[in-house]
Amino acid sequence: MRFVSTNREARPVGFLEAMKQGLAPDGGLYMPEAVPTLENNFWKSLHQHSFHEIAFRMALPYLEGELSEEVIHAVITDAIDFPLKLKSLENSHFVLELFHGPTLAFKDFGARFMARLFSESAGKKQKEVTILVATSGDTGSAVARGFYKVPGVRVCLLYPKGKVSPLQEKQMATLGENITALEVEGVFDDCQRLVKEAFVDDDLNRTLQLSSANSINIARLLPQSFYYAYAIAELQKKGINDVTFSVPSGNFGNLTGGLLAKKMGLQVQKFIAATNVNDVVPKFLKGSGFSPKASVQTISNAMDVGNPSNFVRMLNLYGGSEDALRSDLPGYSYSDSETIETILSVYEEENYLLCPHTAVGYRAASELKVSDPDALTTVTLATAHPIKFRDVIEKELNTKLEVPQQLMSDLQREKKTIPMSSNFDEFKSFLLGY
């Protein structure tokens, strides 16, 4: 399969080459030249397959011809060696828990999948790859853990100083070895800008083999389509067919993964784009133009994005039609106070604890149920374990949360970071001497 840039000026490449480049040379994002569709019988019989079988069938058209079926199987089973859980709450509302991986966030799916593919490439003795990652929280920790000590790969994480949770910072900025953490003076959008400028800088690209592990990378995007099919499979076992997914979104890679699955043939009634006060996409979906703006810090920090990169991919999947995208995708945004209100009410009424991001998605699903009588069954993607935001949640609940054992060692490690301004020349000099 060939992958083309959303800017349509770069030459088509294969999946592994698109993964290595991260961003296309013309500054666009890679997408399949034509999204493959799987037979209807497969989608109707999802409940008869394991999650790994579903993921393999969905990945095969993209990787076929570049990796053997045996290797594809091994990549999937090794990368996704942790469970998914679909929890049933009241009023036909389900929560898909995606936080049971090693860093307790949904980013483990994409980061570990991509790390295993890079490991396959490293075994072919190719040029060392330098991966640049802008993160507002969980991406950094998932990528750091996924790529830790992977041969032939160096990872440089950029995160906004003082704008990630203490636990998130510990998870990504304490490992050392081939993982370097840069503490940037600024916001997430500054980090993302530095990474994008690096990818189109001639000097850097002559010297280094740069790639990205953000959701701009096609290898991060693909595995984020798998778990939508898993949720549908579990609901098929309950005789439920019409499903609406509510997706907490920042850079909108997770939602794009769902839209990609739908384009492949997955039967989904609707998706909801749910975010915090960084509401560029919800405003667009309500009829405004797409107008990026400076991001605002919130308690749902992974969604503090003012210029979502994957918006161009969402448009691409709808043939570039803004009207088609708007007609198919409602958007909602909520303040911190509304997010906290939702966390408290769900905990009090259903004894279920949501992280701030998941609370935004849950509230959007609840609001849609009121306005759309056809939205009978909703599934909210639970993107992170609540413990990752214990500073917020403990304060609001006035109680202490138990820290999972797997995180205790993270909290005890010493932070290893390099301070960095948001000036590109300083970042470029660092990379050239990296």
Image (spheres, rainbow, N blue to C red):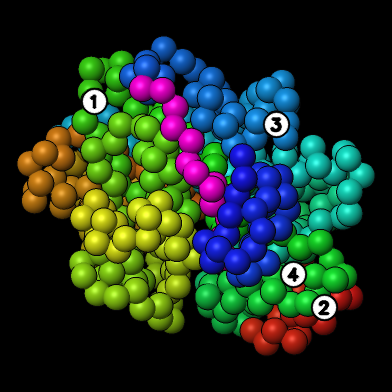
How far, Cα to Cα, is label 3 from label 1?
34 Å
- Which mark sits nearer the N-terminus, 4 or 3? 3
Q: In the image, what residue occupies the spot 64% across and 84% down?
A: 422
Within 10 Å of disc 3 (Cα), the crowding (few <14, some 14-19, many 20+) is few
How far, Cα to Cα, is label 4 from label 2?
25 Å
The magenta region covers 28-40
Quadrant where the image shows the N terminus:
top right
Badge 3 is on which residue? 65
Label number found at residue 241: 1
Q: Nearer the viewer, residue 162 or 109?
A: 109
Q: Nearer the viewer, residue 413 or 48?
A: 48
Element carrying mark 2: helix
- Name which quarter of the figure residue 169 lies in: bottom right
Label number found at residue 417: 4
Q: Amino acid at mark 3?
A: Gly
Does the image show residue 188?
Answer: yes
